[in-house]
Image (tube, helix red, strand yellow):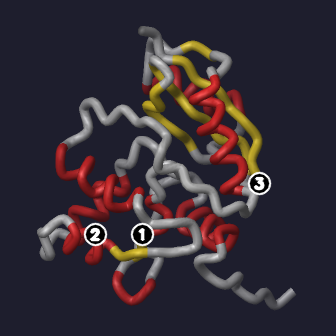
Amino acid sequence: MTAEFTTFDTAIGVCGLAWRDDVVIATSLPSGGASALHAWFRRRFPDAVPGTPGPRVQEAVDGIVALLGGARVDLTAVPLDFSGVPEFNRRAYEVARAIPPGKTSTYGDIARALGMPGSAQAVGQAMGHNPVPIIVPCHRVLAAGGRDGGFSARGGVETKLRMLVIEGAVAEEPTLF
């Protein structure tokens, strides 16, 4: 089956989602607008074509839009295809997926939940390769002591912190101006 993708406006910019057989295979945070996301999806999935989401995929799109707009939306029911994703990463994503909006966890907490307490760095690397950000909320995973721990999406840590502020997981930084 051919992969399909769509782009959509959110409170943080244009995001994208790809699916195959009504199962989400990738998401993208804002990355230079709709045309840039179209090109990114086509590079990632050479057979991909723009499509109109069916009801299940549209639910995922609507949930992402709502979540990034400040609603406390649970995306754990969105069906995901982790084909080709290493087992360790899949397990780490499942643990991260259980972190509710407005809450955070740490790489170390996830490593312990996996029964591998020394693997916090590997958890961080897994989060950096997350094919479905937002649905697998890697932005809710922090380094020890509540430090941001980095973020691989466009905008880096600023995007991560903005998403956490929207969800109410962290207080908005005061500005001088």
Cα distance, mark 3 to mark 1?
21 Å
Residue 11: image tag: 3
Type of the residue with mark 1: Val
Residue 113, compared with residue 28, is above or below; it is below
Type of the residue with mark 2: Ile
Left or right: 84 as drawn, with respect to 165? left
Cα distance, mark 3 to mark 2?
28 Å
Left or right: 96 as drawn, with respect to 76? left
Residue 47, compared with residue 25, is above or below; it is above
Residue 110: image tag: 2
Residue at 61%, 32% (x, y): give it.
Answer: 37
Q: Is residue 32 visible?
A: no
Type of the residue with mark 3: Ala
Q: Residue 154 location in percent, x, y? A: 57, 52
Mark 1 or 2 closer to N-term?
A: 2
Location of mark 1 (residue): 141
Check disc 1 and report its element: helix, strand or loop. Answer: strand
Residue at 36%, 57% (x, y): give it.
Answer: 127
Q: Residue 13 location in percent, x, y? A: 73, 48
Query: In terms of image quadrants, where is residue 33?
Result: top right
Q: Is residue 91 visible?
A: yes
Q: Residue 12 location in percent, x, y? A: 72, 54
Residue at 16%, 69% (x, y): give it.
Answer: 119
Query: In terms of image quadrants, where is residue 121?
Result: bottom left
Badge 3 vs badge 2, beta-carbon distance below 8 Å: no
Badge 1 vs badge 2, beta-carbon distance below 8 Å: yes
Quadrant for the N terminus, please: top left
- How busy is the neighbourhood of tag 1: few (under 14 within 10 Å), some, or many (20 plus)? many
Cα distance, mark 1 to mark 2?
9 Å
Query: In terms of image quadrants, where is residue 51?
Result: top right
Residue at 65%, 63% (x, y): give it.
Answer: 72
Mark 3 or 2 closer to N-term?
A: 3
